[in-house]
Amino acid sequence: SQQGEEDPQALSIQEGENATMNCSYKTSINNLQWYRQNSGRGLVHLILIRSNEREKHSGRLRVTLDTSKKSSSLLITASRAADTASYFCATASGAGSYQLTFGKGTKLSVIP
Amino acid sequence: DGGITQSPKYLFRKEGQNVTLSCEQNLNHDAMYWYRQDPGQGLRLIYYSQIVNDFQKGDIAEGYSVSREKKESFPLTVTSAQKNPTAFYLCASSPPNRVEQYFGPGTRLTVT
């Protein structure tokens, strides 16, 4: 079953603009991760936020987590054409669980 | 994609034939995973293995089989019992006591 649901399904922005993607999930989690997938390629891990964290930064990425609303957001600032990809959230729940449950993803297009 | 290889990149088979997808990693990771991705969808877990000679079914194991005889290798066999085998298959691994996963480049299987 898919735990996470990304929103929007697709997003198109101009280069230099910020892109925000949201993820909602249903059950309690230990952590939430964001991955990027370029077309026809494998996924690349971007950032992990633990359930006791509210915000995390990595370069141009900012992730927030609201466990009361069971939601997370990924913000990419000053987007570049190279950021064009699909972005997935993945959740892990249960003690010692290393199984991830992925959402369906947000397809981001950054127009030069 | 570094450290995890999947071969071949594209694979074509006739209906009724079994086919084995290769996944090799040189990252010294204990845990390995197989996912299936259909167009516009997220990843669904087929099988995972946390240690050599042990593996567990994921959400959609029916029609698939795996083996884990070596730490570096986790081949997936798509059997003729799998009703809709055409998909993009992704292999991943994760370091000990870590939840982030490292993905291979994927194998696109087409069965006609």
Image: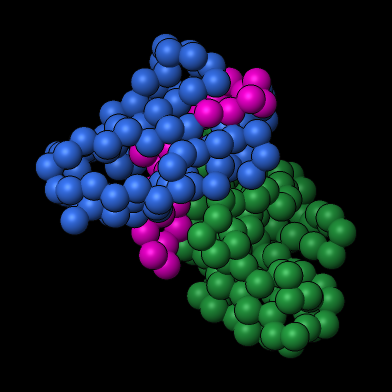
Numbered circles on residues, count = 0
Is residue B87 visible from the viewing direction of this image? yes
Residue A3 % position (x, y) = 46, 53
Can residue B44 be seen here?
A: no
Colour that chain B carries in the picture: blue
- Which residue is drawn at the image coordinates 35% and 48% (left, top)? B11
The span picked out in magenta is B24-46
Q: Nearer the viewer, residue B41 or A93?
A: B41
Image location (x, y in percent) of residue A72: 65, 61
- Find the residue positioned furthest to the right: A59
Q: Colour of chain A?
A: green
Tell me if A112 is positioned left or right of B78 in this view: right
Residue A88 drawn above or below residue A99: below
Whole-percent x and y of residue B43?
44, 52
Name which quarter of the figure residue A83 lies in: bottom right
- A38 vs B52, left or right, is right
Q: Quadrant of the N terminus of chain B?
A: top right
Q: Does the stretch in magenta take in B31?
A: yes
Side of A17 relative to B75 (left or right): right
Magenta segment includes A39:
no
In the rendered structure, the answer to whether residue A79 lies left or right of residue A66 reads right
Residue A79, compared with residue A56, is above or below; it is below
Q: Quadrant of residue B26?
A: top right
Q: Residue placed at 67% from the left, 39% from the top?
A: B2
> Which residue sits at x=55%, y=55%?
A41
Task: Identify the residue shown where x is 82% and y is 73%.
Answer: A77
Up-down: is A25 above or below A85?
A: above
